[in-house]
Image (cartoon, rainbow, N blue to C red):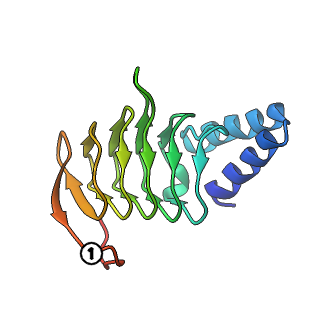
């Protein structure tokens, strides 16, 4: 059973006011995969968290759009201003960190080990520490993985 099925069950219990059951699933995710995927986090349909969420840490206030791809050891963290919001079709490379109230546009690719602390526009590829857009592409799906 994949991590997203565990999350969907966790979220269902939370939405239906069965918080203790949601908490148990959250704890199970932590024990089995070393990741933190809170039931309060909003994750859109079609989103995939690879490697069963190994080391993935999501802030409870983070919002992830539809059809995103989150790889292992990714962190979405909040600061005093708020938590990240990812648009639809975002790909986040392994070990990337996204911190604060940043808005990541639709169809953005974030490279492995990137540190994102600023908004990123739609249809770009961002890499580095701090991450900066290095390439802009059409809104249509391009083949190629990070």
Residue 112 coordinates in the image, percent (x, y): 27, 52
What residue lies at 65% left-to-right and 37% top-to-bottom? 40
Residue appearing at x 20%, y 45% in the figure: 131
Badge 1 density bin: few <14, some 14–19, many ≥20, Cα 10 Å? few
* Residue at far top of view: 80
Which image quarter holds the N terminus?
Answer: bottom right
Give the quarter of the image for residue 136.
Answer: bottom left
> At 31% across and 60% down in the image, what residue appears?
122
Examine the rendered structure and indicate whether residue 33 appears above or below residue 69. Answer: above
Q: Residue at x 35, y 78 (%)?
A: 140
| Image-based side of 66 in relation to 100, left or right | right
Counting from the top left corner in percent of width and height, residue 19 is at 80, 33
For mark 1, give the secondary structure.
Answer: loop
Q: Position of residue 73 (x, y in %)?
A: 41, 45
x, y percent for residue 91:
38, 60
Q: Is residue 107 above or below residue 8?
A: below
78 lies left or right of 138 = right
Front position in the image: 118 or 128: 118
The quarter of the picture where the C terminus appears is bottom left
Q: How many marks?
A: 1
The residue that label 1 is drawn on is 138
Taking 62 as reference, is 77 left or right? left
Asked if 111 appears above or below 26 in the picture, the reply is below
């Amino acid at each position: 059973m994949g991590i997203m099925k565990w999350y969907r069950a966790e979220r269902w219990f939370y939405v239906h006011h069965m918080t203790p059951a949601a908490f148990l699933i959250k704890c199970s995710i932590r024990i089995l995969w070393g990741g933190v995927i809170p039931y309060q986090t909003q994750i859109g349909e079609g989103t995939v968290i690879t490697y069963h969420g190994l080391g993935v840490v999501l802030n409870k206030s983070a919002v992830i759009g539809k059809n995103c791809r989150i790889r292992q050891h990714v962190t979405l963290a909040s600061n005093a201003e708020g938590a990240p919001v990812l648009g639809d079709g975002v790909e986040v490379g392994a070990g990337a960190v996204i911190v604060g109230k940043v808005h990541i546009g639709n169809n953005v690719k974030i490279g492995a080990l990137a540190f994102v602390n600023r908004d990123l526009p739609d249809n770009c590829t961002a890499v580095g520490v701090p991450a900066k857009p290095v390439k802009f592409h059409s809104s249509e799906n391009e083949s190629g993985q990070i």
